[in-house]
Amino acid sequence: MHKEFLMGNEAIALGALAAGVDLVSGYPGTPSTEVLETIARRNPGHVYVEWSINEKAGMEVAAGAAYTGARALVTMKQVGLNVASDPLMSLEYIGVKGGMVVLVADDPGPISSQTEQDTRTFGMFSKVPVFDPSSVAEAYEMIQEAFDYSEKYGMPVFFRATTRVDHGYETVEVKDPEEYYVNKAEGFVKDSSRWVIFPRLSVKNHALIEKRNAELKDVFSEYSRNRIIASSGSKGIATQGVNFMYTLDSLRGRDVRILRVATPFPFPEKLALQFLDGLDEVLCIEELDPVIERALTFVCGKYGLNVKIRGKLTKDMPASGENSMEIIDKAITAFTGIDGKRSEEVMEKLPEPPELPVRPPVLCAGCPHRASFYAVKKAMKGQKTIYCGDIGCYTLGNAAPLDMCDTCLCMGAGIGIAQGVWHIEPDTKSFAFVGDSTFFASGITGTVNAFYNQADMTLVVLDNSTTAMTGHQPHPGTGRTVMGQIVEKVSIEKVLRAIGLKVVETVDPLDFDLAVETVKRVAEEPGVKAVIFRSPCIAISKPKGHSSVDPDKCIGCGKCIRDLGCPALIKDTDGKKARIDTSLCTGCTLCEQICPAKAISGGNKNDTAEGRRHE
């Protein structure tokens, strides 16, 4: 054993390795991404690791491994669970032979997600047991226990970490590689009565699942991480996850009995009865859904207990959003009637924090997506057009001054939405933007649907050769895997032509005039057609210089600043003429190409398609 200072996701990864995991699959999504990346980086040599094409594929790959008796881990964030839910719902009926943990990172806030889904609620819906760690160190231990329970009962289990656990840091005592559990997979044993799902098998196994989960209520009541912290008072707090740590910090001497719930489903009913004994009222502190609150209300009703259960449903806690120390302290003060704040003398000595600057998210300076959006905007000026966006860096195309994202729902949805709008409003020019990684993850199906159903729309693939928003993970179009293998790239052009598209054009968006001309021409073609804007993300293709403004030529029109919104473009001290922040500029030359006075120069013209075309 040795100690390491670890991020939560790193601790989870090392815990999985210590548990003898054999295969890890997943799809990148904040706040889950670092788990798979850490396993790939710390791989002892025998673990197979992959970034799957999407969460559904990752779930199925992990299930196949678990069918053989191997220990498997699949990682995703809460919205990714929606994609993976189809195989998961059936997998719960089939079961597994080796331990299989489905790591879902929930994102209260949400900080970087479309939704505030609670995987604990999904666990109840899918009948899949849920493990809910409260700290980085506990996550390391708990994921090992999750594998053990999964294997013992032949079931997949959820491991539900949230952002503050995933991205928190703590010193953790971890096992050395020679101490890792060594799993010995039996291999796949053919048995159609077990592995082939038919209605008769589903009916039989459903009954077994209900029996198993009823048993787990008692088993989890004895699980050491579900526990009661006793007190002499008549008030109690039931809590979970990182909220348990917040609650302990907020108590500061206030005498309250605590129930910490580490397995929200199946709910540890016997332990809850012990907790409720002698209490008058309970405050439930949890994120995001009132899972514990509902469970305790049910227990009180079932056993005729006269205990008032308070929380989100009674408006004693916020119904949505991430909890904070301040929110929890205020709730506990109202609940107990005792102010737990530190002395006023100490509070008065604390200086007022400065007001933080407002920093809305923006596309990076030199981002090729800015050039892509601007080219489409100029090409379609004056026409009735809808721009359907997607999930990724390019969602930021909605911000002023580009204003090029009219809709955004979920990964790949823009392609379907563009079709729906066109079928109802055929006089609308429908555009769907999708990134290269998202195209492979969930864009191909929508494109096939558009072609098959004879839609008239323009698909715009923003190909920056990486999965940029989640940390530059590889994908099928990059020609490499997370394990470092060099593989043949999957060609987006060939995929589109194989679907049946006749018009597929590829252009560098930083060759602005050609990009505008290409969009104009392609958009006039009938049916489904595509423009692939290909230019590498500036984070993986490092800049070699920067542009600069000649103040004598600059006429102060502000077109570069007003039209592009590039953070490197600012006004000079006189407030009239443009200036370039050289610490941000990448020399992409887009501003040079649109400046009416030709006052900007010096960018990496030879490194752009426009430059090469004119050499």
Image: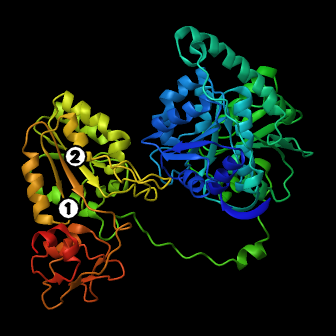
- Rendered image: mark on residue 598: none
Give above or below for 573 relative to 162: below
Q: Is residue 380 visible?
A: no
**How many marks on residues?**
2
**Rendered view: 139 above or below 191:** below
Q: Quadrant of the C terminus?
A: bottom left
Visible residue check, residue 589: yes
Q: Nearer the viewer, residue 135 or 334?
A: 135
The quarter holding residue 537 reads: bottom left
Q: Is residue 256 above or below residue 83?
A: below
Is residue 351 rendered to the left or right of residue 306?
Answer: left
Q: Give the percent coordinates (x, y) of residue 398.
A: 30, 55
Amino acid marked by disc 1: Pro
Q: Which mark is residue 509?
A: 1
Q: Residue at x 58, y 19 (%)?
A: 190
- The dot on residue 493 is 2
For label 2, the SS is: helix
What residue appears at the point 83 percent right and 28 percent down from the top-left corner?
A: 270
Q: Amino acid at mark 2?
A: Glu
